Amino acid sequence: MIALRLVRLIEHHSDELAAELVIKLETSSRTADLRKVPIDELRRRLQEILRHLSEWLLTKTGHDVERRYFEIGERRASQGVALSDFCWSIVLVKEHLWEFLQRQGSMHGPVEIYGEMELLRLLDQFFDRGLCFATEGYEQYSQLHDGSDAAPSKHAS
């Protein structure tokens, strides 16, 4: 399965990708609030996903994804990270993985293109669901704590 080969490539380069992502997340104006998260924690969370991406995409259940991302959402809310910055961080991770695969440049024929499309579908599903579950966790934390510990919206008037 070509999609699995591509996922293994991401897993093999997980440390490199996590390091690049930490820099990207720390320097992006869209994710400035992530500077409230200790760098080691941010790196560990990224590595947790990237090192075991095949498990997350192929063997973990929807409940596993829900539980993990719900917890991450609660954690970011407790750290005062703005919800928009947190959402952008998930989007940037997904985009960075595609940039990495494009840099590898090994996809040429129809079979490889099909593998890329299958991986795109799996990654989109994983990260989109992760984003929704993380937002639910974030919102629940904010509601339970009356919003006092959570970051205000950047767009509030």
Image (cartoon, helix red, strand yellow):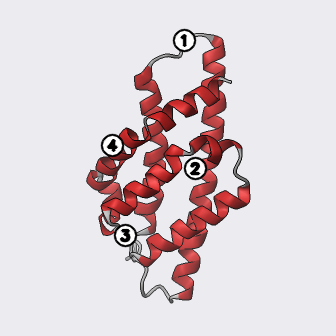
- Viewer-nearest of discs 3 and 4: 4
Whether tag 2 and tag 1 are in contact, CB under 8 A, the answer is: no
Mark 1 and mark 3: Cα distance apart in space = 43 Å
- Label 2 CA crowd tier, 10 Å (few <14, some 14–19, many 20+): some
Residue carrying label 4:
20
Q: Secondary structure at mark 3?
A: loop
Q: Is residue 13 above or below residue 75?
A: above
User: What residue would you read off at disc 1?
Assistant: 108
Residue indicated by mark 3 = 154
Q: CA distance from mark 1 to mark 4?
A: 26 Å
**Mark 4 crowd level (few <14, some 14–19, many ≥20, 10 Å Cα):** some
Q: Picture quarter containing residue 152? A: bottom left
Give the image location of residue 51, x and y in percent: 51, 44
Residue 2 visible (yes or no): yes
Picture residue at 39% right of the left edge, 75% below the top: 79
Residue type at mark 2 is Phe
Question: Which is closer to the viewer, label 4 or label 2?
Answer: 4
Q: Is residue 88 visible?
A: no
Which residue sits at x=45%, y=50%? 47
Question: Which amino acid lies under the numbered mark 3 shown in the image of this protein?
Answer: Lys
Residue 38 rendering spot, x and y as whole percentages: 32, 66
Contact between marks 3 and 4 (CB within 8 A): the answer is no
Name the residue rendered at 46%, 40% in the picture. Answer: 95
Considering the numbered disc 2 on the image, is that residue within a helix, a strand or a loop? Answer: helix
CB contact under 8 Å: marks 1 and 4:
no
Q: Give the residue type that dot 1 points to.
A: His
- Distance CA(mark 4)–CA(mark 2): 18 Å
20 or 151, nearer to the observer: 20
Q: Nearer the viewer, residue 155 or 108?
A: 108
In the picture, the quarter occupied by the N terminus is top right
Mark number displayed over residue 127: 2
Q: CA distance from mark 3 to mark 4?
A: 26 Å
